[in-house]
Amino acid sequence: MPEGIGEDPLILVSNRGPLEHTRGDDGRTAKPGHGGLVTALGGLAGHLEDAVWVCAALSEEDVAVTREHDGAAFEPEGGGPGVLLRMVELDPEAQHKFYAIISNPLLWFVQHYLWDLGNTPDITRREVDAFDNGYVPVNARFADAVAEEVEARGGRATVMVQDYHLYLVPERVRDRCPDVFLHHFVHIPWPHPDAWRVLPPVMRRAVFNGVLGNDVVAFHSARYARNFLLGCQELLGLQVDMDRLTVEVEERSVHARHYPISVDADALESTAASPAVADHERRLGEKRREHLIVRVDRADPSKNILRGFRAFDTLLDDHPELAEQVTFLALVQPSREDVEEYVDYLEQVRRLVDDVNAKHGTADWQPIELSLEGDFDEVVAAYKLFDVLVVNPVSDGMNLVAKEAALVNQRDGVLALSENAGAHEELGEFAVTLHPFDIQQQADAIFAALTMDGSERRDRLAASAALVRENDVAKWLSDQLRDVNELRGPGH
Ligand code: F6P
C-alpha cells in the first residue's frame, strides 16, 4: 500500500476519469473508466483521506451528473474510487478540437514518431484553430477547476496531473496558486527534441512552458526523461543538468524523474483464476493448434499491428512446415473512433488479415484470428495460453500487456518485445527483442521464440514474472510519493 502524501491534500487531474456514467433501461450506472492510467491511479486514490479527482465529463450521463452537482466536487454513489470527483463539463466543439485534432492525432503522433513527414501532417488553419480554440481553453478550464479545489483547501496541495492532454495546466495553476506542489506524469514517450519541430514554434513553446510549471515531470523510462531535458535545452535554451536530471526555470529547479508503471499483480492473478476466464480458456483450448501466437492491443498506429502481421506472413512463407500448426490470435480493441487516422488504421488491419488468411489459409485453418470484442476475460485467457506474445510497437510509453501477460502465462510463453516499448528497459533481457520496422527480423525472432528450448523458455518467463510481481503498481506509486515528500521538503 503506498505511503501517504504528508499533510497536504491531493488533487489528481486527468482527461479520462475513474468513473464513466451511462444510462440504460435500469437507470444510471457508473462503471470504472478504462485504461491503464485510471487503473493504476485508482490504487492511490483509495488510500487517501482528502483527495479529489478532476476529470472531464465524457459521456452524456457524466454531463447530467456534473450538472446535478453544479460542477462542484461530489462523492460518487456507492463510494466509487474512494475520492471526491469533480467532473468538468466542456463545450462540445472545444472538446472535439482538444481531443480529436490536437491530443489525438497531433500530439500523440509527434510523441510516437508516427507522422510520415514527407506527406503529413499539414498544419493548417484547422490545426491552429483547434489549438487556440480547443486545446488552450480546455486546459484553462481544467486549470481553473484545479485552482478552485486548491483554494478551497487553503492554497496548499499536491497536484498530480496526468498525460499529454493537459500540458498547459501546470503553468496556469502555478500562476494562481504559488504554494502548490505540481507533479505531472507523462504516460507516453517523450521524443527527441527534433520530433517537436513538427509543431510550429508557438505551439511547442506553449507545451514546454506549460509542463515547466511543474516541480516534477515524470516518465516511464530514463530515455524519455533525458529527451525531455534535451528538449528544454535545445528548444528553449534552458540550462539542464543531465546527472541530477534537472532544468532551471527562472528561480526554480524542475526535476525529471522516471518510474516504470506496472500492474496490480494480486488483482490480475485473481482474475486469471476466475470461472469466466476458465470458460474462455476452454474455448481457446478446443481450437488451438500446435502453437499459439497472441497480441493484445488498442487499434492504434503506434502499436504496429500491420507490420506484425506482415512479419507473420513472412514467417509462413519461410516455414511452410508451420502451415496449419500455428494460429495468430489478435485481440484488438477499437480505439478513438472519432479520429480519422484511427478509423483508417483499423480498416487497413482488417484488410491485411483477410489478405494473409486468403494467401495461407486452408479449408479448416485461418492463420490469423482477429477479435474486436475487447473482453478482458478473453484477454486474460489468451495471456495464460500463448506460446509467443507479440508486442512490436513503433513506440510505446510502457506497454502493460507485456507485464500482464508475463505474470499469468502458464505455457512458458516467450515475450517478443519491441526495443521501443518502455517495458523493454525492464523485460528486454528476458524477451526476444523485435526491431519494429524490420519485418524479416520480426519473422525470424518469432520463429526463434516458437522453437526455443523448453528450459530457456521456463527460465525467461519465471524471471519476467518475478520482476513484474516485485515492481508492481504499488511500488510505482510509493516511489513517486517518496520523491514528492522529499522534494517538497519541510514547510512546503
Ligand atoms: O497511454 C496513454 C493513455 O492515456 C492510456 O492511459 C489509455 O489507456 C490510452 O492512452 C487510451 O486513451 P483514451 O481512450 O483516453 O484516448
Image (tube, rainbow, N blue to C red):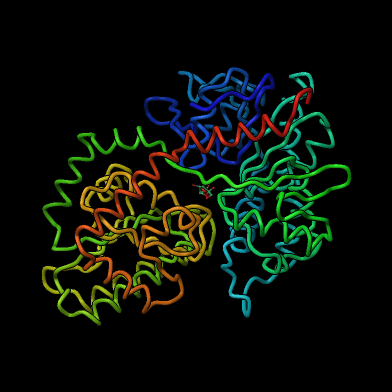
Specify whether 73 is left or right of 355: right
Residue 244 lies, with reference to residue 109, above or below; the image says above
Left or right: residue 387 versus residue 218 is: left
Q: Residue at x 78, y 50 (%)?
A: 247
Residues 440 and 333: in front is 440
Q: Is residue 330 above or below residue 491?
A: below
Q: Which residue is pictured at 72% across the width and 43% down the height?
A: 139
Give x and y (percent) for residue 446.
30, 69
- Residue nearest the observer in this picture, 234 or 57: 234
Q: Residue furthest right?
A: 250
Image coordinates for residue 115, horizontal then vertical, percent: 59, 70
Q: Which percent across, then down, holds residue 68?
A: 60, 22
- Quarter where residue 78 is shown: top left
The quadrant of the image that shows the C terminus is top right
Image coordinates of residue 283 in percent, x first then y, are: 15, 49
Tell me the quarter of the picture where residue 215 sits.
top right
The residue at the point 35 percent across, 50 percent down is 464
How many numbered badges does the structure rendering display? 0
Residue at the image point whose x is 56% and y is 23% from the top: 83
Left or right of residue 438, residue 407 in this image: left
* Residue 123 image-quadrant placement: bottom right
Residue closer to the observer: 200 or 88: 200
In this orientation, which residue lies closer to the viewer: 273 or 216? Answer: 216
Vertical relation: 334 (above or below) 472: below
